[in-house]
Image (tube, rainbow, N blue to C red):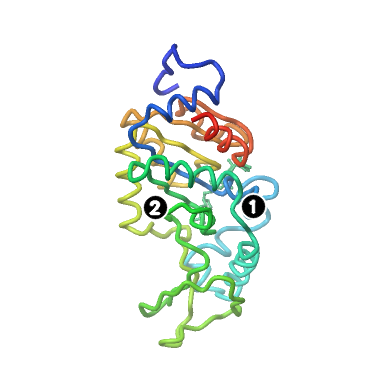
Amino acid sequence: MHNPIDPELPEDDLDRAAAIVRQARRVAVLTGAGVSAESGVPTFRGATGLWEGQAVTDVATPTAFARDPALVWRFHNALRAHMKVAAPNPGHLALAALERRFGNRFTLATQNIDGLHQAAGSRNVLELHGRLSRVRCAACTYVADRPGEDLPDLPRCPECGAMLRPDVVWFEEMLPHGVWREAYKAAEGCDCFLVVGTSALVFPAAGLIEVAGSARARILEFNLERTAASSRVDLGLYGPSGQTLPDLMRRL
Ligand code: OAD
């Protein structure tokens, strides 16, 4: 355990988590696909994950896009169809409520590309891996949010005719610089860090947990199970985040 829990904190894990959050001056959160699982959005890893039976190198790298853009678009269009019908779940709503409580002392960084945090009312969301509803031109500066639209397998830029691509971060690509800098600052400057629904296997995003730990923030993990980050956290709340996060909010 990184920062030992004060012995005077309550015994029940959720009560202890609530006490830690209540005492916090600044809260930062990192979310992953697990927070959207209860909204019907597939996660990436695990038996029913998107990467099961699907090589990321075929559909989520710039090399794959250069080799076979139609295959890459078919994968992303299937995901867009999933996300079109997905609605925020109580986990997203609880995080939006937490932001309202802390105001500008709260930052939410997400690896998710589904936009569900914003749909739940979260305002200050740092999208580390971009957003699937947005497209951008592979050649010029055209960027547009085009949610709910059925795109063809090879969508073209309305301005220059070159190929459009999803405005998401693929493997081998850099994170958007400003967004990463803000997330890093938030992790470094918080005294309570929530890690929600992520396997903590993909870097640099997972590195934010280490950044927060090094700054001596209390780290709380919300997941179905232990993860690569569990040995670094102060307290793990294991169960569906659509239940554990609202449970936490009720105790604040
Ligand atoms: P993963 O699929 O790797 O991990 C999902 C995590 O959510 C696992 O640890 C599950 O145990 C947990 N989980 C599942 N259902 C849950 C629930 N109801 N409540 C709480 N936890 C639950 O997804 P990420 O960690 O988000 O990147 O993956 C990180 C990145 O890898 C993604 O952003 C994506 C992917 O490749 C890019 O596409 C660049």
Q: Residue furthest top?
A: 7
State which quadrant residue 250 falls in. Answer: top right
The residue drawn where x is 38% and y is 45% is 107
User: x, y (%) of residue 74?
Assistant: 62, 71
The residue drawn where x is 38% and y is 37% is 27
Q: Residues within 10 Å of mark 1 (few under 14, many from 20)?
A: many
- For the residue pair 62 and 149, the one nearer the viewer reads as 149
Side of 69 where 29 appears, left or right: left
Which residue lies under the disc numbered 2? Answer: 124
User: x, y (%) of residue 216?
Assistant: 33, 28
Under mark 2, the amino acid is Asn
Which residue lies under the disc numbered 1? Answer: 39
Instruction: Return the mark for residue 212.
Output: none
- For the residue pair 51 and 42, the one nearer the viewer reads as 42
Side of 127 where 180 appears, left or right: left
For numbered disc 2, what is the local secondary structure?
loop
- For the residue pair 9 and 82, the one nearer the viewer reads as 9
State which quadrant residue 187 falls in. Answer: top left
| On screen, residue 185 above or below 247 | below
The residue drawn where x is 59% and y is 50% is 36
- Ligand 1 contact, mark 2 (Cβ < 8 Å): no
